[in-house]
Amino acid sequence: MKKSINHTLFFKQAPEYVWEYLTKPELIELWLMKTDFQPIVGKQFNFTTRAMPNYGFDGNIYCMVLELIPLKKLSYSWKGGPGDGVINLDSVVEWTLHEKDGGTELQLVHSGFKETDAFMFSIMNDGWLKNMHKIVEYLNMKNDGTGEIRRIPGDC
């Protein structure tokens, strides 16, 4: 039986502002990790972070854009493993935006976790929620009247 991560957050900003944080590499890097993402269906891209060899992770996440409906939906494959072409996590990330109450409801569904992925599921479940909250913080900072995006203290 496969498991899914499900998180929904409300943003006081309109969908186009939230969408930017899901589709612009320089903004994705602020809240998630370095990427060469391009919003083109079929486009392959990577996320890169520090390797965790003790957990069978080489620091690379291999992705491909599966679906793109501007300002509404974005989905991509999410694959990772220990390296040398070995993939032991093969999943899908899906973002859905709904305009609601003068803002945006953002839903994340990260699906395809096997029962043997329990440790990674636990880490990623907490991590996705934490990172989604970073988007909220960045959007709120951008709307402080300066129009600038500033790093959150403690960010690297």
Image (cartoon, grey):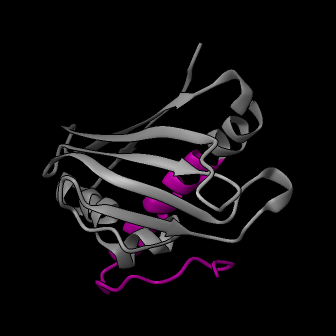
> Which picture quadrant has residue 129?
top right
Residue 155 drawn above or below residue 85:
below
Quarter of the image where the C terminus is located: bottom right
For the point 57% across and 76% down, which residue is it? Answer: 152
Left or right position of 41 against 54: left
Residue 136 drawn above or below residue 50:
above
For the point 39% across and 82% down, which residue is it? Answer: 149
Q: Position of residue 44 (x, y in %)?
A: 32, 61
> Which picture quadrant has residue 77?
top left
Left or right position of 4 against 118: left
Residue 40 drawn above or below residue 11:
below
From this viewpoint, which residue is outermost toward the front? 84
Q: Position of residue 22 (x, y in %)?
A: 33, 59
Left or right position of 151 against 120: left
Residue 33: say if magenta: no
Q: Position of residue 73 (x, y in %)?
A: 22, 42
For the point 46% across and 84% down, which residue is it? Answer: 150
The answer to whether residue 140 of the structure is visible from this angle is: no
> Which picture quadrant has residue 9?
top left
The answer to whether residue 74 of the structure is visible from this angle is: yes
From this viewpoint, which residue is outermost toward the top? 1
Left or right position of 39 against 56: left
Residue 144: say if magenta: yes
For the point 44% across and 61% down, which residue is it? Answer: 135
Q: Position of residue 1 (x, y in %)?
A: 59, 12
In front of the other: 114 or 26 = 114
In front of the other: 33 or 106 = 33
Which residues make up the magenta segment? 127-156
From this viewpoint, which residue is outermost toward the right? 54
Residue 30 drawn above or below residue 58:
below
